[in-house]
Image: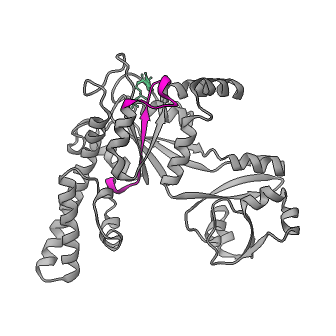
Amino acid sequence: MKAGIVGLPNVGKSTLFNCLSNAKAQSANFPFCTIEPNIGVVNVPDARLQKLETLVDPERVLPATVEIVDIAGLVKGASKGEGLGNQFLGNIRETDAILHVLRCFNDDNIIHVDGSVDPIRDKETIDMELQLKDLETVDKKLDKVKRAAKTGNKEAQKEEAVLLKLKTGLEAGTSVRAIELSKDDREEFVKPLQFITDKPVMYVCNVDEDAAATGNEYVDRVKAAVAQEDAEVVVLAVGTEADITELETYEERQMFLEDLGLEEPGSAKLIRGAYKLLNLETYFTAGVKEVRAWTIPVGATAPQAAGVIHTDFEKGFIRAEVIAYNDYVEFGSETKVKEAGKMRVEGKEYIVKDGDVMHFRFNV
Ligand code: GDP
């Protein structure tokens, strides 16, 4: 599961990527500077992990991670192959969620490809390229389905109706995720086509340092423009946060953040947002050797969760011993939780809850 960073050139994508992954992608005041898609593995900040660490005092602590891809090079005309457009659209198709970076800062030294700062216009430029690509997908499919529909095939006629609705929506500038369709139609006809504009999206407003805590007028406009999309909008001073990651000590970083009026880096909020966008959640294992956060898709069963640790755990699954995170913290240790009768034994059907602290019993 991975989230892709998209946006016009020079909005701060590579800076954000670097700041998230500490990888050294190139960043320069020049469009097309990041040509290879860069993939980074990012730790997911989770205060519960620190809490478990103080209770268990393990040898090591391993956080959950999420994969982030920096997808550069999207420009006007990309869907027609402008710039390195088609290649990048292909890279976006392989992601599971989109982090759409919008330039919400003024800086005359940083060239804007369209000459002025306007996050709404920028968003529409990118959206249109993605929508045009999806329109190609619809048209191709429609060609095939039409023939079958003409022969009186009921299923094909149903599909044709859905495709025509998608076509009308996309041509009017609506992304697939925002086109009104029944759940069944989405499941049956939309999902298999893996539209780019059907992927969940989060908007990242890149602001100046002084707007890190408060946002600015650009941010307000973005929020208003995406209100119907039910998408999260995160405000982030990307350039400043990149500077913060360069600081040596935790205390220095914390002081810098306080100066900005922030309790934690905006990037932490962004990473957690991406994790949620990917429909992922966390369960923990907590032992003296290791306290660790494991990533599962929302709705995973106990054996599936066990399978994340090792496929043998899933195959040989017998049962799981489960402690709710809040119980673990309230009673302070596994032994005390057991004494209080708060440890549950769960079977194959159990749907794991976010924050469960688990032990698995299995046959080898
Ligand atoms: P990309 O093309 O979207 O990947 O953009 P980059 O991350 O390479 O950034 C382009 C230029 O904008 C670089 O010179 C960055 O230092 C600068 N930049 C990035 N974020 C900010 C910001 O929040 N404020 C200002 N003033 N400059 C920024």
In the image, residue 48 above or below residue 142? above
State the image quarter where residue 188 is shown. bottom left
Residues rendered magenta in the picture: 197-217
Please name the residue shown 32% across and 21% down the image. 111
Q: x and y percent of residue 292 in the render?
A: 71, 53
Residue 224 image point, x, y percent: 34, 42
Whether residue 153 is in magenta: the answer is no
* Image point (47%, 30%), residue name: 15
- Residue 310's quadrant in the figure? bottom right
Ligand 1 sits in which quadrant?
top left
190 vs 310, left or right, is left
The foreground one among 172 and 278 is 172
Residue 301 sits above or below residue 103 on the image: below
The answer to whether 248 is drawn above or below residue 158 in the figure is above
Which of the two residues, 336 or 281, is positioned nearer the viewer here?
336
Q: Quadrant of the C terminus?
A: bottom right
Q: Position of residue 187 (x, y in %)?
A: 36, 70
Residue at point 60%, 28% (across, down): 245
Which image quadrant is residue 151 in?
Answer: bottom left
Q: Is residue 364 visible?
A: no
Residue 307 showing in the rendered view: yes
